[in-house]
Image (cartoon, rainbow, N blue to C red):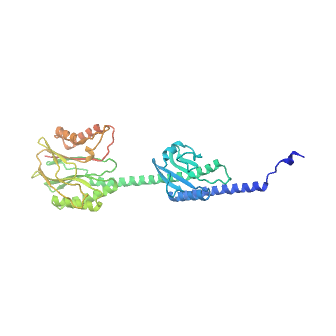
């Protein structure tokens, strides 16, 4: 008998049937990838992309358990799950991402990961984007286990990278929006803060404004009232951006209207407080100092609404101008209010500032504080307001060394001749 007669002849129909099943299986995979690609190109939401992903894993791959963690700037959150209606396993995504740099199977022997078969880390270059844990995967013999992992890895990467791109695109749009908002807010603020301050035979004034960002929450103003009086003020508005700028604009409009109407200080401050509170519903507030000076009587009438006390240097002494009330806007009605009044001696210097100055911190966790201001006032009170402000800035820069400014800084210095 010939040797060939003892050789088993393959079942050709069975081979064809197996090849057809493998072809159908591959077609389904390609169709799944196309479906995901269409969803991505259609700018579907992250929730919708995850829904497509889950449907493919459940219907075509028989996945019974799934957890996907997404990394948003080192904040790992659970974004997608299958097979956990109640208790989800305690899991540290960062630890396992660092441990498994590539797709790995057979994680069942890991105590924490006993419910999963496959770990799929997703990254761009070395940046961690996400981590997928997949369990109860069905195997039908149409492909090897490594091939199954490869397809799952491709599909998972498509979804997570697409969601990361959506997040980055959204952040870019938000940054552009914020940039335009800050530009607009800066324009509003520049219109509100005076460029030129009065300097004449009665008073000399100088101001410096250093916003922490393009636009801040500080505000100062100087408003002449006829030939004999002048009003000056400084404020710190909580918040930043266009919201704070618009509140500042509304605040200035109300303030200037009340000043032109010669409203008495007590009533003036209470109206301002109600206005701020009604606009912000108590969510934002304003610290505020305002003074009205009459050069004929040399009287300064003022109110300090929760602001850093302005400091008056006169005849060798420094007097804090601290009479007033609480901050504006926090309560519908001010619980108490005291209007201050002082006589201003010739050549007295009044220094107004915001708390960004005193709260500036250096690299040794020291605050600039008020004592340094008091020392400078005692030593250099004879300088012009502009000279004094510039000297203070020099001291401020030396103090902070390489640390950045961490808040807006404003100063308004007034000499009363």
Q: Is residue 328 above or below residue 389?
A: below
- x then y, percent, for residue 132: 54, 50
| Residue 9 visible here | yes
Residue 141 as seen in the image, left or right of residue 185: right
- Residue that appears at 41% across and 55% down: 177
Residue lying furthest left in this view?
297
- Left or right of 124 in this view: 24: right
Q: Along the horizontal axis of the image, is 23 left or right of 314?
A: right
Q: Quadrant of residue 392?
A: top left
The front one of 5 and 23 is 5
Q: Position of residue 81 (x, y in %)?
A: 52, 55
Q: Find residue 319 and report its horizontal and vertical position in percent.
A: 15, 45
> Against 346, is 279 above or below?
below
Q: Is residue 197 left or right of residue 65?
A: left
Quick one: 274 or 53, which is closer to the camera?
53
Foreground residue, 306 or 312? 306
Residue at the spot 27% in from the left edge and 46% down from the top edge: 356
Position of 373 relative to 337 (above/below) = above
Q: Is residue 294 visible?
A: no
| Residue 384 pos. (x, y %) | 18, 42
Front residue of 275/122: it is: 122
């Amino acid at each position: 008998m010939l040797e060939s007669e003892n050789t088993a002849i393959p079942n050709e129909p069975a081979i064809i049937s197996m090849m057809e099943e493998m072809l159908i299986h591959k077609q389904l995979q390609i169709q799944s990838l196309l479906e995901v690609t269409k969803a991505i190109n259609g700018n579907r939401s992250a929730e919708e992309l995850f829904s497509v992903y889950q449907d493919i894993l459940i219907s075509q791959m028989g996945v019974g358990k799934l957890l996907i963690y997404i990394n948003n700037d080192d904040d790992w959150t659970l974004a997608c799950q299958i097979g956990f209606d109640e208790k989800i396993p305690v899991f540290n995504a960062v630890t396992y991402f660092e441990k498994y740099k590539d797709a790995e199977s057979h994680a069942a022997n890991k105590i924490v990961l006993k419910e999963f078969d496959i770990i799929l880390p997703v990254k761009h270059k070395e940046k961690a984007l996400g981590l997928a844990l997949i369990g109860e995967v069905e195997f039908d013999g149409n492909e090897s286990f490594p091939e199954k992992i490869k397809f799952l890895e491709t599909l998972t990467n498509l979804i997570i990278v697409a969601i990361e791109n959506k997040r980055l695109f959204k952040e870019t749009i938000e940054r552009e929006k914020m940039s335009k908002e800050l530009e607009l807010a800066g324009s509003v603020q520049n219109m509100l803060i005076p460029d030129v301050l009065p300097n004449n035979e009665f008073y000399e004034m100088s101001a410096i404004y250093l916003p922490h960002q393009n636009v801040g929450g500080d505000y100062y103003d100087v408003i002449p009232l006829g030939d004999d009086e002048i009003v000056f003020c400084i404020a710190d508005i909580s918040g930043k951006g266009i919201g704070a700028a618009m509140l500042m604009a509304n605040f200035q409009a109300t303030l200037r209207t009340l000043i032109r109407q010669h409203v008495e200080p007590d009533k003036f401050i209470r109206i301002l407080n109600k206005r701020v509170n009604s606009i912000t519903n108590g969510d934002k507030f304003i610290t505020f100092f305002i003074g009205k000076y009459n050069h004929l009587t040399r009287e300064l009438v003022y109110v300090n609404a929760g602001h850093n006390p302005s400091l008056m240097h006169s005849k060798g002494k420094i007097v804090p101008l601290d009479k007033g009330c609480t901050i504006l806007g926090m309560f519908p009605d001010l619980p108490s209010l005291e209007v201050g009044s002082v006589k201003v001696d010739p050549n007295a210097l009044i220094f107004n500032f915001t708390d960004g100055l005193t709260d500036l911190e250096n690299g040794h966790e020291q605050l600039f504080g008020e004592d340094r201001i008091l020392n400078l006032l005692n030593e250099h009170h004879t300088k012009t307001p502009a000279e004094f402000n510039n000297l203070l800035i020099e001291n401020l820069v030396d103090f902070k060394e390489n640390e950045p400014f961490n808040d807006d800084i404003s100063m308004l210095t007034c000499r009363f001749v």
